[in-house]
Amino acid sequence: MRKAIFAAIAVAAVALPVFASVESGLKPGDRVTPFHPEHVVGPLAGTKNCFPCTFQSRPAVQVWVHGDSQENVASIVKCLKQNMEDHKAKEFKAMVVMVADSASQKEDMKSMIADHCKEMGKDGVAIAVIDRDNEALKAYKINLDPSVKNTMIVYKDWKVAKTLVNVKMSDEKACGESCGAIALVTK
């Protein structure tokens, strides 16, 4: 009987983290830091320029993606593009950072992004790739657990206003939360 009770407690203890909210990314009040991904499309295409350094105090969002579906990433990019248009007067900027697990995956990502996002031009959403062992992942506290598909960090003046994890743009609530977070920095 004791073994059965102990086994049940052990199983419950292991299962407990599944129900806890997943954390990833910098917290409100934290500061974004310089980093140098490989920009594939957008205003920094073909460079490894630092996005926060380039756009300084402007309101901005970075969405770090690791293992999310192409459909959701496309929806995120579409949402960010619309927000860039809606907040053009505030010079709102957006970047998606795709995290690659290997060199071959990184090359595949770069090719896919270049093929599918040509029309975005220099004024569109920046899309970059980065290796999973890049120190920026630690600096930005990006959780690479398979349960974390994306991490949205919204900031202005280098200071984080809001972070959202696992944003699904097909979910009306998530769309509202994303636009609400962007509104915090574009007032």
Image: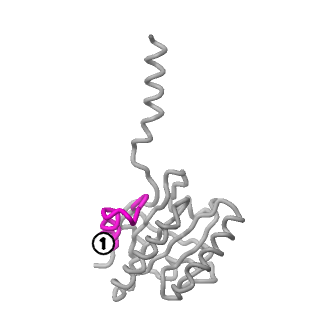
> Residue at horizontal 42%, vertical 36%?
16
Crowdedness near tag 1: few (<14), some (14–19) or many (≥20) residues, C-alpha within 10 Å: some
Q: Quadrant of the C terminus?
A: bottom left
> Residue at horizontal 43%, vertical 17%?
5
Determine whether 119 is above or below 103 in the image.
Answer: below
> Residue at horizontal 63%, vertical 70%?
109
Q: Position of residue 52 (x, y in %)?
A: 49, 76
Please give the range of residues in magenta: 164-182
Q: Is residue 136 magenta?
A: no
Q: What is the total number of numbered labels drawn onto the structure image?
A: 1
Determine whether 1 is above or below 28 in the image.
Answer: above
Badge 1 marks a residue whose secondary structure is helix
Left or right: 153, with 118 as reference point: left
Q: Residue furthest left?
A: 187
- Residue 78 image-quadrant placement: bottom left
Q: Amino acid at mark 1?
A: Leu
Q: Nearer the viewer, residue 173 or 155?
A: 173
Left or right: 89, with 7 as reference point: left
Q: Which residue is mark 1?
A: 184
Q: Residue furthest right?
A: 104
